[in-house]
Image (cartoon, rainbow, N blue to C red):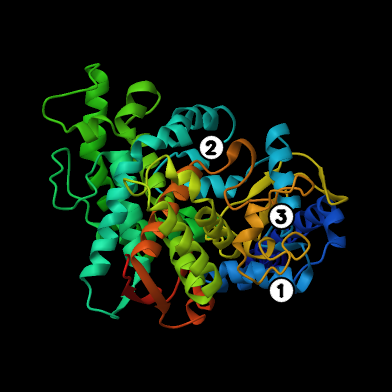
Amino acid sequence: MFQEITAQIAFSSFFPYLSLFLGFSSVVGILSWRWWKQKNTYKSLESIPSPPRHWLLGNIPQVLAAVKQKKFFQLLFDWSQQLGPMYVYRVGYPILVLSKPKVIEQTIVNGMRDGSLVRSKQASKAWNDIGGPILLGQNGAEWQWRRKAWNPEFSSSGLSRYVEIINQACEQVIEKLKAAPPLKEVQIDPLFIELTMRVISSLMLGIPVDSKTASPEGPPLDVLKVYESMSILGYRFLRVATGEKRWMKYLPTKNSRDYWAARRYIEDFLTPRIDLALQMREQNKTDLAQVSSLFQESMLVKIAAKEPKYNRETLIAEAIELLIAGTDTTAHSLSFAVAELALNPRVFQQAQAIVDQVWQSPGGINTENLKELTYIQAIFKETLRLYSVASGSTSLEAQRDIIIEDKVIPRGTKVFWSMFGAGRDPEIYSHPEEFLPERWLNKSTESTPLPMITFGSGSHRCLGEHLSMLEATVMLSLLLRHFDWELVNGRASLENLQQNLLIYPCDGMPVRFRLRNEG
């Protein structure tokens, strides 16, 4: 009896250790099984170059450090320089990164056409976490009806009616520069951010581009506050897209508090106008006495009227997406274009001569003489080649085994691309480090057109491509007509870049302008 009791006591004392051992063994077993399964599933990727990685964490430490330092685009570019035009890094799962323009273009077009590639679940969740379900966060039928609704508003013909609004916004920038003391340093990146935000807010929400004009449909546009909120939401997307868990926004951290404050501010700014657009839809009226004609003609009112699937939540989310997409992209690219013009006198002088010639026709810039500014458009395209502001901010996922460059890419692999690497591919762009707008004006029928992949490819090509090109052409033409300028910090302004959601100049791009004798 005593021995039996002793044995029971010994077993009961040992039992917790046994449970702990069994639990630990189970965890090790599960992890080992997952490791074995992943290794076999993605075995074909082992022949593709990879950066050095931690034995357990893979490349997570490098990626998180790069995101924190706002240098994720630089990490992708550096790896492409070290490892070649196709490599794999791992963050718990493999990510294939491409940096050859034609391979990227063919992969996107073919993969999204035949359904073998779709937006990755991680990226879609990150996009939809910004403020709710949005166009960029969807695939299949959900993506199609949203894209169909917005396409006409952003087409080249649809945007022609907005040239006057864009001209007005650009003229306001010119007046601010003329009002500044001679040769005073001016940070142009914030100026361009205000420009592009006022344009997209006017087109989409019906807010006048002139801040002195009242907007009866809702709160005035506070550019600084809206931009700060957008930046916080954009940076959160990048963190989630590169591995941060979505539930972390509920933790009592500064990042979480900033996120919720930013989201509340943006929603409070948008809601009155969205509710009014929905009210107009319910009453089946496209014109109300108490609203302005600008609001009645806004994209918001048109989309709400023709697409009943949109409700308050989805319109708020979509408006946040378009505010972000329609502001930083063109603004930062304009800053880079101004900088490259300052550093390339030959291009500057040729562009200025073309603008002066166009100005001889009455009415300044209009829909007709825009066709004569192809060299200015080429300057912007060359800028986008060298400084693709959206580098590394999106990804696709293989739905089945596919072949890229004779390599088997297994189902489930994420596919990224380094636009910085692609834009500097010497096989496609001769003298890739030189700023040569002429490369986009080659009329030879024997040569294949250069791939312009900054705006994406295929049916998923950037919705705002025509708007961006139009804004940039008008703004650069006006600057060239009225000013000469020099870059205060020289090439350092183009070398010291950071990435929030998009890539931007750290110094705000300070420039000294000199008013021209226009003759």
Label whose residue precedes the other's in the sequence (1 or 2):
1
Q: Quadrant of residue 86?
A: bottom right
Which residue occupies 70% across, 47% down? 105
Q: Position of residue 441 (x, y in %)?
A: 63, 53
Note whether 61 is above or below 32 in the view shown: below
Q: Nearer the viewer, mark 3 or mark 2?
A: 3
User: Could one spot residue 98 in this view of the protein?
Assistant: yes
Note whether 82 is above or below 116 in the view shown: below
Q: Which of these two is toward me, 437 or 66?
A: 437
Residue to which mark 2 is pinned: 138
Circle 3 — which element? helix
In 3D space, how far apart are the residues under numbered discs 3 and 1 (Cα atoms)?
30 Å
Circle 2 — which element? loop
Label number found at residue 101: 3
Q: Which amino acid type is marked by label 1?
A: His
Label whose residue precedes the other's in the sequence (3 or 1):
1
Q: Position of residue 152 (x, y in %)?
A: 45, 30
Which residue occupies 36% across, 56% down? 230
Residue to which mark 1 is pinned: 54
Q: Which amino acid type is marked by label 3?
A: Pro
Q: Which amino acid type is marked by label 2?
A: Gln
Which residue occupies 29% across, 61% down? 173
Q: Which of these two is toward me, 139 or 93?
A: 139
Pointer 2 local density, CA inside 10 Å: few below 14, some 14–19, many at least 20: many
